[in-house]
Amino acid sequence: MRGKITDILFDESQINSRVAELGAEINADYAGRDIFGVCLLKGSIIFCADLVRHIKVPIRVDVMRASSYGSNTESSGSVKILQDLDIDIAGKDVLIIEDIVDTGRTLHKTLELLTVRHPNSLKVCTLLDKPSRRVEEIDIAYRGFSIPDKFVVGYGLDFDEYYRNLPYISVLDPNG
Ligand code: PRP
Ligand code: MN
Ligand code: MG
């Protein structure tokens, strides 16, 4: 069952212009510094790939894989770190690049893990923010869009691994 795509929340051009704006904000804030980007797999693959092409300051990118949802539309509540970074982040200006902050559990766990490694700074950039579902408070430095409490897919976000390929972000009716 792959559910049914209903309303499109953000189309390709809305996403592109917002991602470019986020890139410009990041470039201004990190002027004169190096960024160590952390792409949180798998949801942020598309966003990260697009965002980093707007970054004009030196940036390195590593990946980390966290999972909480499994094949459900509801977060399981237990976040697993399935793959850690390759590179030591001590002293670095770390920017976590994430597709969506929902309950906040994934980022809470990730931030907890990375903080103890003593980066010089640690900030979060997320394309989507669903504040109504927050369980763990997360300080979001860069936010693409705030969205209502709807299950969304596309542009990296999945339902049972499908729909990451959609160039737009859409609401999904899992029972449709
Ligand atoms: C999704 C999404 C975020 C997280 C947000 O990942 O990509 O990482 O859930 O939810 P939270 O704020 O409630 O933790 P998922 O666990 O589905 O793994 P995926 O990125 O591989 O799809
Ligand atoms: Mn994810
Ligand atoms: Mg997922």
Image (cartoon, rainbow, N blue to C red):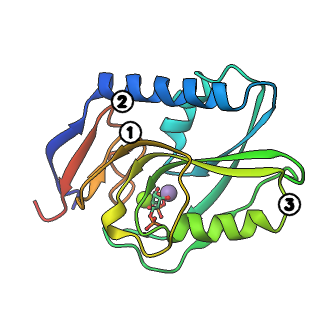
Name the residue rendered at 42%, 78% in the picture: 76
Q: Secondary structure at mark 3?
A: loop
Q: Amino acid at mark 3?
A: His
Q: Quadrant of residue 144?
A: top left
Rendered-image quadrant of the C terminus: bottom left
Q: CA distance from mark 1 to mark 3?
A: 32 Å
Determine if the C-beta at disc 2 is less than 8 A from ligand 1. no
Looking at the picture, does residue 50 appear above or below residue 119?
A: above
Residue 67 at x, y percent in the picture: 53, 66
One can see residue 107 in this view = yes
Q: Residues within 10 Å of mark 1 (few under 14, many from 20)?
A: many
In this view of the protein, can residue 72 be seen by the observer?
no
Task: Pinpoint residue 56: horizontal percent, then vertical percent.
Answer: 68, 19
Q: Position of residue 142 (x, y in %)?
A: 52, 42
Q: Is residue 87 left or right of residue 4?
A: right
Alpha carbons under labels 2 and 1: distance apart? 9 Å
Q: Which residue is mark 3?
A: 118
Residue identifier under label 1: 155
Residue 154 shown left or right of residue 85 in the figure:
left
Residue 88 spot, x, y in % from top left? 88, 53
Q: Nearer the viewer, mark 3 or mark 2?
A: 3
Residue sitting at x 51%, y 31%: 22
